[in-house]
C-alpha cells in the first residue's frame, strides 16, 4: 500500500473538478506556492494536468476558478 500524498483539486469556473496528485515529496506550503504560481500565468496558458486515474486533462488558466490543496488522507481501515 502506498502512502497517501497531497492532492490538487483544480476547479473550473464551470464547476468541473480535476483531481491531480502533487509532486512526490511536496509539502502543503510548497504545493500552495506552486498553485499560486500556476494561477499567475497568462490567461491563455494551457495546463496539461495528469489526473489521479492516470489520464490527462487540459485547461486554460483563464478557465480555473481556484486550486484547492488537500492534505494526505488515509481513510480508516474497516
Image (tube, rainbow, N blue to C red):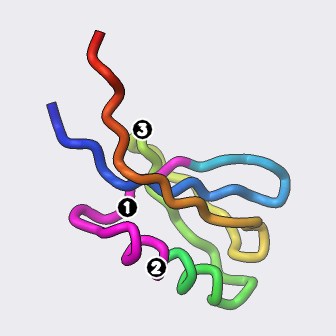
Badge 3 density bin: few <14, some 14–19, many ≥20, Cα 10 Å? few
Q: Is residue 42 magenta?
A: no
N-terminal label among 1 and 3? 1
Mark drawn on residue 53: 3
Q: Nearer the viewer, mark 1 or mark 3?
A: 1
- Residue 43 lies in what quarter of the image? bottom right
According to the picture, the residue beneath numbered tag 1 turns out to be 22
Asked which secondary structure carries label 3, the reply is: loop
Image: 20 above or below 26: above
Which residue corresponds to the image point at 52% horizontal and 48% vertical from the top-left? Answer: 19
Q: Nearer the viewer, mark 3 or mark 2?
A: 2
Image: 42 above or below 32: below
In the rendered structure, the answer to whether residue 52 lies left or right of residue 66 reads: left
Q: Position of residue 44 (x, y in %)?
A: 73, 83
Residue found at the far right of this picture: 14
According to the picture, the residue beneath numbered tag 2 turns out to be 34
- Residue 65 lies in what quarter of the image? bottom right
Amino acid at each position: 500500500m502506498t502512502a497517501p500524498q497531497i492532492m490538487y483539486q483544480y476547479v473550473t469556473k464551470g464547476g468541473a473538478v480535476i483531481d491531480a496528485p502533487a509532486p512526490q515529496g511536496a509539502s502543503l506550503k510548497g504545493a500552495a506556492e506552486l498553485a499560486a504560481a500556476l494561477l499567475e500565468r497568462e490567461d491563455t496558458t494551457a495546463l496539461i494536468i495528469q489526473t489521479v486515474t492516470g489520464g490527462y486533462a487540459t485547461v486554460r488558466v483563464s478557465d480555473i476558478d481556484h486550486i484547492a490543496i488537500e492534505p494526505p488522507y488515509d481513510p480508516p481501515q474497516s
